[in-house]
Amino acid sequence: MRKIVLYKGLSVDCDNFTPTDYKTFYSEYTNKGKGNVGNKLFGQAVEKYITNDYTSYTYVFYDETNFIPFATDINIDEINENYDLVLMPQANIFCDSELHRNLLKMWTKGIKQFKIPVFVIGVGIQIANSSEISALARAIKREASEFIESVFATGGNISLRGYQTKQFFDALGFSKVVVTGCPSMFQRGRNLHIQNQKVSETDFKPVINGNLSRFYKSKFTKIFTDYKNAVYIDQDQTAPILYNHCFFDNLRKDRNIFDTIPYNCLKLIAENRLFLFYDIQAIFNYLVQNSINFSYGTRIHGNIMAVLNGIPAFVHIIDSRTEELADFFCIPHSRKMYSKNIYDEYLKCDYKKFNTTFPKLFDNFEKFLLDNHIIDEKLEDFSLFDNKISNIKWQNPQIINQNHINSLFERIERHKIWYMTYDYLNHYSKIILSHL
C-alpha cells in the first residue's frame, strides 16, 4: 500500500465529501481560509487521481496564522518513517511580491525536513504578460532556485502549468522539467470532448465569471441585460455579501454602498442570478441541470469547470497565468473582450483543436504520474472517488443574506435616480481626484 502525504495549501478546503453548510460558511471561510473555489477544483482533482485500491493518504496544511508550511498532527519524523512521498498541488507561487518570496522561503525550509520525495504538480508563474518572464527570473532568482533545488534534493520532481512557466524555469537553469498543465483538467478522463454544435440565440444560456470590478463596465453588464438566462458564478469575492450574518449591520455604518456592492452585482443577487458555490460537484450539477451551454470570463478555473462538463468556454485573458493554461489546452481565448456580443463570441468558438490535442495532453500528464511512481496504473478508473461523490446529496447554496439583499435592492429601485447618481459620483470621483 502506497502512503502519500497530500499537501493542502492556502485557501483550499480539505473536505471534498461533506456538503457545505452555508449557514456557517462565512465563519469557516474567514477562520479556515477556504478562499477561492478554483483552488479547490485542482486540489480535488489530485485527490481523485490517488484515490485507488493501492494508495492511502493523509493531509498536511499550510498554517497561515503561524506561517508553518506543513502543519499536521503527525510530526515530520513519523512522515519520513511511514510515508512514501509528499504531493504538493500548487498554482501561481512564482510571483514578484514580498508575500510570495516569504512563502517560497517557508516551503523551502519545510521541504528540507523531508527524507521522502516531494512532488510539486501544476506550478506556475504570475505576471501580466510573457515579456516579464526574464524580469521575474531576475527578481526572485534566489528564492525560486532554492525552492526548486530543495524539491529535487528529496528525489522528487516538478511539473509545470504551461510554457511561459517553462521559459521561467529555463531562465533559472532548470530545463529538465515537464509541462503538464493544470491537474484539474484531467478528472473527466482521456475522452473529454467539446461539441461544436451551436444552439439558437433563444436557447443561449451562458454562465459568466470574473472579478466584481467588471460590474462597473457597461460592456460587461450588458451581457446580463441582453441575455436574461445569463448567470454569474463567483469564486470568492461575494462571500461576505452572501454569507456574513453581520455584513448588512456593518454596511449601515458605511454610506459607500457601491464601493462594496456594485449596483449590477446586487441586482443579479436579487434576481437569483449570482451564485457562490463551495462544492465542486454542486457546481457541476448546476451547469448540467440548468442546460448551461457557454462559459465566458476571466477566471480560468471557472471556465475549466464548464469544459469538464462538455460545455464550450471562452477565456478573457487578463494575465499570463490564464493565458498559458488556455494556450496549453487550446481553450479559445483573447485579451480583448467580445467584439459584437457574447453570443457572437460563442458562435465563433471552435473546439476542434482542443478535441484533437486533449488525449495527448492527458497521456502526458498520466506519464508524469507513472514515471514518478505517484500512481501504478493508468488513470482510467475513477470509480472509487466518483462513487463516493455520487452518493452524497449536493445542494445549491442558500444565500443567508437574501432578505437583506432584496430589501436593499428594492430601496435602491425606489430611489434609483438618486442612487445611480451617487454610484456614478462615488466611483468616478476617486478617479478624478487621483489625477488632480
Image (cartoon, helix red, strand yellow):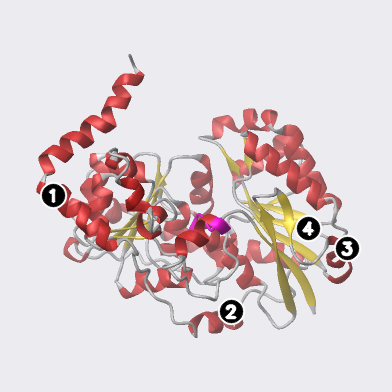
Residue drawn at x 63%, y 74% as measured from the top left: 379
Query: Do residues under tags 3 and 2 come within 8 Å of each other at their CB atoms?
Result: no
Question: Cα distance, mark 3 to mark 4?
Answer: 15 Å
Asked if the stretch drawn in magenta spans residue 108, the answer is: no
Q: Amino acid at mark 2?
A: Phe
The amino acid pointed to by label 1 is Glu
Report whether residue 22 is seen. yes
- Locate residue 292: give its quadrant: bottom left
Helix or strand or loop: what does disc 3 sit on?
A: helix
Q: Magenta segment, which residues?
A: 31-37
The label shown at residue 118 is 4
Label 3 Cα neighbours within 10 Å, binned few <14 / some 14-19 / many ≥20: few
Amino acid type of disc 4?
Val
Task: Sort mark 4 into few (<14), some (14-19) or many (20+) by Cα contacts within 10 Å.
Answer: many
Left or right of 265 in this view: 237: right
Cα separation, mark 1 vs mark 2, equals 47 Å
Amino acid type at circle 3 is Asp
- Name the residue nearer the viewer: 112 or 334: 112
Q: Quadrant of the C terminus?
A: top left
Viewer-side residue, 364 vs 123: 123
Measured as percent of width and height from the top left, residue 246 is found at 38, 55
* Residue 32 forms part of the magenta stretch: yes
Q: Which residue is mark 1?
A: 413
Check disc 2 and report the residue beneath it: 385
First reached walking from the N terminus: tag 3 or tag 2: 3
Of marks 1 and 2, which one's residue comes earlier in the chain?
2
